[in-house]
Amino acid sequence: MRLATVRAALAALAITTGAASATPRPQPVHLATYYATWSAEAGPISGLDDKLAGVPSGVTEVLIAFMKPDAIYSGNLDLAGTGIEVPYSGPVLKASLEALRARIPGIKVLVSVGGEQYANWSRFNPGAIRRFIEDFGLDGIDLDFEPTAPSCRSLSGHISCGSDALLREVVEAARTALPRPLAVWLTATNTGAYGEGVWREARPTGGPTYGAFLPLLRDAGRRVLLDGISIMAYDAGPSYRPLEAYAAYRSHFEGPILIGFTSPPEAWGGHVYSVAETIETFRSAVKLGANGAMVFAIGKEPPTAPSPTTPSPDHLIAALIDAAGKATTD
């Protein structure tokens, strides 16, 4: 689907349902970045996690990755059983976050739950996660829901998945445990809104999570529990079109949507986001009504020889900070 077709689809949605608009939203541009706790370290002089405390100004949300859905948190800033993989104590993590907030007043910090490695959602423990958020002074949760076998199929033009009920229960339980103003965000897979309507055969077709988020998005009572969606617009190969994926998600969700990027290598498909492609995709998405970008991840190992065509995470983030600032003032 070309950009003109995406614009036409969004305009049609705005006319027929009022659910989407191709007009940029008059609100701040988000720039969220994951923080890879498995690459963290405490500085020898400060005693803090200097990388976390030094997240670049211009980032609006930090997603601490990853906490187990079935986490055990006993309190007292004890990280054992949480899945958070920092090589230091809970008090060091909290002090590092306080240093970050002192540097960048107003920055939001969410704990990201799940990811590829932590998938025991059937034992989701929102009470433990709520206590963790309270003790560390966080602003909410990012649900990185990646079930091992969603078992999706198309029936009479509609996608249904074996994971549907579980995802609905998780979203509802998260919101019940974390009432607003605490945030509940969802990180959704690249092709998770494909498989129906004009996106019935959007490429790349197939894959275990093709259409996996549609049943949730069709559920008006559940989707309003979410404060935003980040699309993992990567790991999908060269035929994938991020703006098409955005249009598919936007056709169901009126809240903030962020376009996700990652530095090379991607986990699947061989695609590489250059700085130029990243910025062009970001600018086009914002013009279509997207609310910003997400990057995976501070702490991800950079390419051997970073360059504008094979950028490091830091390079991508810096370029997006500049682009987001321009988008806000345009």
Image: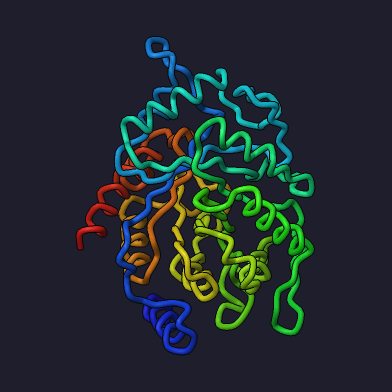
Q: Return the residue nearer the eye: 218 or 36.
A: 218
Q: 41 left or right of 287?
A: right
Q: Would you place residue 301 above or below residue 25 in this image?
A: above
Q: Is residue 79 visible?
A: yes
At x 32% / y 36%, what residue is drawn? 104
Query: What scheme was used to colour the molecule?
Result: rainbow
Q: Residue at position x 39%, y 77% from top?
A: 21
Is 119 situated above or below 168? above
Tell me where residue 42 appears, x and y as whole percent: 46, 17
Kindly give the residue lying farthest to the bottom in the view shown.
16
Measuring from the top left, give residue 330's x and y in whole percent.
20, 63
Residue at (79% x, 63% y) in the render: 162
Residue 269 in view in this figure:
no
List x then y, in percent, for residue 236: 55, 58
Q: Nearer the viewer, residue 183 or 31?
A: 183
In the image, taking residue 45 as reference, residue 323 lies left or right, namely left
Pick whichever, 151 or 240, lies toward us. Answer: 151
- Classify residue 204 as left or right of residue 14: right
Q: Residue furthest top?
A: 45
- 174 and 191: which is toward the camera: 174
The total of numbered circles placed on residues is: 0
Question: Residue 30, position in %: x, y?
Answer: 37, 53
Q: Residue at x 67, y 65 (%)?
A: 212
Q: Quadrant of residue 315?
A: top left
